Image (cartoon, rainbow, N blue to C red):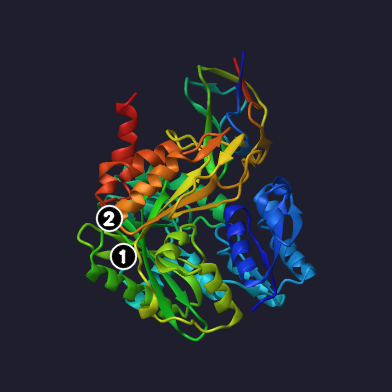
């Protein structure tokens, strides 16, 4: 299992997956908004999303968990 | 003149307004979010009040709280700076209703120019050329496809309420249009609260050239020359200069005349900017009007010797313009670069703590910034942390001074776009003076891959 983390602090603008979703390498799972820009968060390997830690509108800090992937 | 004003903004522009107020003996009131409590602009103001939590909708966009502070502090007027509430007609109206002078045009004018679709219609009526396009909001992907057939690709998909490059995208085909439509519509809804979209024909080799105007409340309107702002990334300006190295004198006069005509038609007052796109044959088309002070106003100040904030304050106080069009000097050449806290390759923001900061100095060098060593660049606000302006007798001289100054700009702890700026302003295409809005795509980005 791997944790996918926020690359920088910002607001969660969109959550693109839910628990149980199959994702492929490089797929975007969430989009953060930081300094008026959209920052995509993507997974490094394919797998299944086992947990989603954030909701749209949440504020996350750098390195905060976004999703778990198995 | 006013004796005290509130500045409804933050960062470098708040500090810029404070500087002119200090010169004129006007007391200043700063508002700040919890994230900006230690900021220079708060220290420099005569009074400062916390306006709320860091996110802008809980602080710098909280109109009611800002007005409450303005009244409590005894301020007579509100300077909105740029961005944030500067083009918010409801805020301007609230100021007036509460007995505060809004330093800008009337709320109705802000509203009419805030909708790009409305502005297109108005400018057409005024006899100012507009780009071929759609003058009604496009509701759906299918409607967009139909409209696109009528005009023909390539097209710019745009949000009517858009700004700062958000909600716009260049599309070349039905497929690209469909792919871009919903995302940009949602973006426009979430950023501007208005998802109205429209389409404009894409102008090949577009130059972004804008005319600064100044108008009083008695119908006097003068142009303060133009600025060329073609170098952009993410549809946001990075390098701006005055005068434009591209247009000839004949085009220049026509553009200044068109800008004055546009401002007159809508009954404009205060400082404003009419943005145009100019094609390679020097035909120009209305793009939008910014009803506020612009980020890049310093280049106009450098060649005219005017203080635009001072002019704004005088006009807002009810004074008549003290100069005519013929009095406005055009002396030498000025170039501004925007320093962004961002990765110079991906343009992704780079918040963090500034560990070292030292501004370059020299003859003809001007800095506008509001950070210092130890400042925190937070994720809540725009990544622009400063502006560097160079003035020279000629464009060549301004370019040389700018390059030396950029090389001596010392900032550490965060990533900045300074490497990108250096590559841009020393590129032969930039030095030749022919820059289009595609410069970054055509000349800067290829430079990165070839030097890997």
| Kind of element beneath mark 1 | strand
* Along the viewing direction, whichever of B26 and B238 lies nearer the viewer: B26
| Kind of element beneath mark 2 | loop
* Along the viewing direction, whichever of A51 and B314 lies nearer the viewer: B314
* Along the viewing direction, whichever of A51 and B346 lies nearer the viewer: B346
Q: Is residue B398 visible?
A: yes
Q: Name above or below for residue B62 compared with residue B102.
A: above
Q: Is residue B378 left or right of residue B240?
A: right
Where does label 1 land, which residue?
Answer: B285
Chain letter for the residue marked with disc 1 in the picture: B
* Residue B115 x, y percent position in the rendering: 48, 65
* Residue A6 x, y percent position in the rendering: 60, 29
Quarter of the figure with the C terminus of chain A? top right
Chain letter for the residue marked with disc 2 in the picture: B
Mark earlier in primary sequence (2, 1): 2
* Residue B294 x, y percent position in the rendering: 49, 61
* Residue B448 x, y percent position in the rendering: 35, 30
Q: Confirm or deny contact between disc 2 and disc 1 (CB under 8 A).
A: yes
Q: Quadrant of residue B378?
A: top right
| Residue B203 circle label | 2
Q: Is residue B59 visible?
A: no
Residue found 47% across the figure and 20% down from its top: A25
Q: Is residue B3 left or right of residue B322?
A: right
Q: Name above or below for residue B256 compared with residue B233.
A: below
Residue found 45% across the figure and 78% down from its top: B266
């Amino acid at each position: 299992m791997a944790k996918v983390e926020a690359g920088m602090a910002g607001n969660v603008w969109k959550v693109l997956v839910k628990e149980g979703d199959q994702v492929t390498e490089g797929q975007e799972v969430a989009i953060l908004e930081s300094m008026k820009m959209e920052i995509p968060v993507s997974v490094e390997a394919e797998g299944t999303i086992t947990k989603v830690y954030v909701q749209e509108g949440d504020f996350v800090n750098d390195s905060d968990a976004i999703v778990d992937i198995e | 003149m006013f004796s005290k004003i509130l500045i409804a903004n933050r960062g470098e522009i708040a500090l810029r307004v404070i500087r002119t107020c200090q010169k004129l003996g006007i007391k200043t009131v700063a508002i700040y979010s919890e994230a900006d409590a230690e900021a220079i602009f708060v220290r420099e103001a005569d009074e400062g009040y916390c306006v709320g939590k860091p996110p802008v909708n809980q602080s710098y966009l909280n109109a009611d709280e800002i007005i409450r502070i303005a009244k409590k502090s005894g301020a007579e007027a509100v300077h909105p700076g740029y961005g944030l509430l500067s083009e918010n007609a409801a805020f301007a109206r609230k100021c007036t209703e509460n007995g505060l002078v809004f330093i800008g045009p009337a709320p109705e004018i802000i509203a009419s120019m805030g909708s790009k679709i409305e502005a297109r219609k108005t400018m057409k009526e005024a006899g100012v050329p507009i780009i071929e396009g759609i003058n009604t909001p496009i509701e759906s992907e299918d409607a967009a496809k139909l409209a696109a057939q009528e005009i023909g690709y390539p097209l710019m998909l745009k949000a009517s309420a858009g700004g700062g490059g958000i909600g716009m995208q260049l599309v070349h085909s039905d497929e690209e249009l469909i792919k871009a439509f919903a995302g940009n519509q949602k973006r426009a809804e979430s950023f501007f609260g208005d998802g109205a979209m429209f389409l404009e024909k894409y102008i090949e080799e577009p130059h972004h050239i804008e005319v600064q105007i100044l108008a009083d409340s008695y119908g006097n309107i003068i142009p303060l020359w133009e600025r060329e702002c073609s170098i952009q990334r993410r549809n946001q300006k990075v390098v701006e200069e005055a005068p434009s190295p591209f247009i000839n004198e004949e085009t220049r006069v026509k553009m200044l005349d068109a800008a004055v005509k546009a401002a007159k038609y809508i009954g404009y007052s205060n400082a404003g900017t009419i943005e145009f796109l100019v094609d390679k044959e020097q035909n120009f088309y209305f793009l939008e009007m910014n009803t506020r002070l612009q980020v890049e106003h310093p280049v106009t100040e450098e060649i005219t010797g005017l203080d635009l904030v001072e002019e704004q304050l005088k006009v807002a106080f009810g004074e008549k313009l003290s100069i005519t069009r013929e009095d406005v000097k055009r002396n030498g050449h000025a170039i501004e670069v925007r320093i962004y806290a961002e990765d110079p390759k991906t343009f992704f923001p780079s918040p963090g703590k500034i560990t070292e900061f030292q501004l370059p100095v020299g003859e003809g060098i001007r800095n506008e910034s509001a950070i210092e060593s130890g400042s925190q660049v937070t994720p809540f606000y725009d990544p622009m942390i400063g502006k560097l302006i160079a003035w020279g007798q000629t464009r060549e001289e301004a370019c040389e001074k700018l390059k030396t100054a950029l090389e001596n700009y010392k900032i550490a702890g965060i990533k900045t776009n300074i490497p990108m700026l250096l590559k841009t302003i020393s590129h032969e295409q930039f030095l030749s003076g022919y820059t289009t809005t595609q410069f970054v795509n055509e000349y800067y980005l290829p430079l990165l891959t070839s030097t890997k």
